[in-house]
């Protein structure tokens, strides 16, 4: 691990299962990052009321970078503005990230890119192997568009969930900050 400490980390956890595999992965990352001296906000977006982008263009015009919709996304914008690291944590539902995580990802559009963001990571779980390509493709597209560093991806299929081996991969990922 390098000597940079005290980074602001935002984890967006997109599984509706409070004690499920994705929530476990996000919590393990949070604990590892906090133990390394980072400030971490873990937000369970699946239990927030966040609508999808309406493509109305308000944020690019009269809104001057602010979304016209006033829902729970308002809680995330200040966290996104300060985040230096963004971690997306999602179960894989039909080959991509959950709808609960897609809505906040798409609503970041009004910011274009979180201003202080330097790094990202992806945590993904699924019952099946070989179903991660869609989510990983979207994640890499976001990385490239924003021009931020990829600190890595941890996936866990059914026999890898909540195991010491997966915890070790998450600790290694959090250690790359």
Image (tube, rainbow, N blue to C red):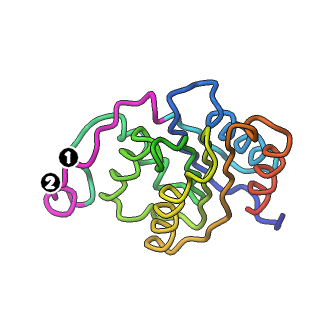
The percent position of residue 89, horizontal first and vertical second, equals: 57, 45
Instruction: Look at discs 1 and 2 and give the one toward the viewer.
Output: 2
Q: CA distance from mark 1 to mark 2?
A: 9 Å
Up-down relation of residue 108 to residue 12 (above or below) = below
Disc 1 to disc 2: CB gap under 8 Å: yes
Q: Looking at the rendering, in which quadrant would you find the C terminus? A: bottom right
Magenta stretch, overall SS: loop
Name the residue at 22% across, 57% down.
Answer: 59
Task: Give the residue number, with chain letter if any, for mark 1.
Answer: 68
Up-down relation of residue 169 to residue 139 (above or below) = above
Q: Which residues are magenta?
A: 45-64
Question: Is 47 part of what is drawn in magenta?
Answer: yes
Disc 2 crowd rating (10 Å Cα; few below 14, some 14-19, many 20+) is: few
The percent position of residue 87, horizontal first and vertical second, equals: 59, 52
Task: Give the residue number, with chain letter if any, for mark 2.
Answer: 56
Name the residue at 35% across, 64% down.
Answer: 112
Q: Is residue 82 left or right of residue 159?
A: left
Up-down relation of residue 141 to residue 54 (above or below) = below
- Indicate the secondary structure of the residue bearing disc 2: loop
């Amino acid at each position: 691990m390098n000597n940079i400490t005290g980074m602001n980390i935002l984890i967006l956890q997109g599984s509706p299962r409070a004690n499920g595999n994705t929530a476990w992965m996000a919590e393990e990352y949070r604990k590892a990052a906090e133990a390394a001296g980072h400030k971490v906000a873990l937000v369970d977006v699946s239990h927030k009321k966040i609508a999808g982008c309406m493509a109305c263009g308000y944020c690019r015009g009269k809104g001057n970078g602010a979304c016209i919709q006033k829902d729970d996304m308002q809680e995330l914008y200040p966290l996104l503005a300060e985040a230096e690291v963004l971690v997306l944590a999602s179960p894989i539902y039909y080959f991509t990230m959950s709808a609960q995580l897609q809505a906040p990802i798409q609503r970041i559009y009004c910011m274009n890119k979180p201003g202080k963001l330097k790094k990202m990571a992806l945590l993904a779980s699924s019952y099946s192997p070989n179903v991660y390509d869609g989510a990983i493709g979207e994640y890499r597209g976001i990385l490239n568009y924003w021009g931020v560093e990829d600190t890595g991806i941890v996936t866990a299929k059914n026999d890898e969930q909540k195991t010491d081996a997966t915890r070790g991969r998450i600790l290694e990922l959090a250690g790359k900050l």
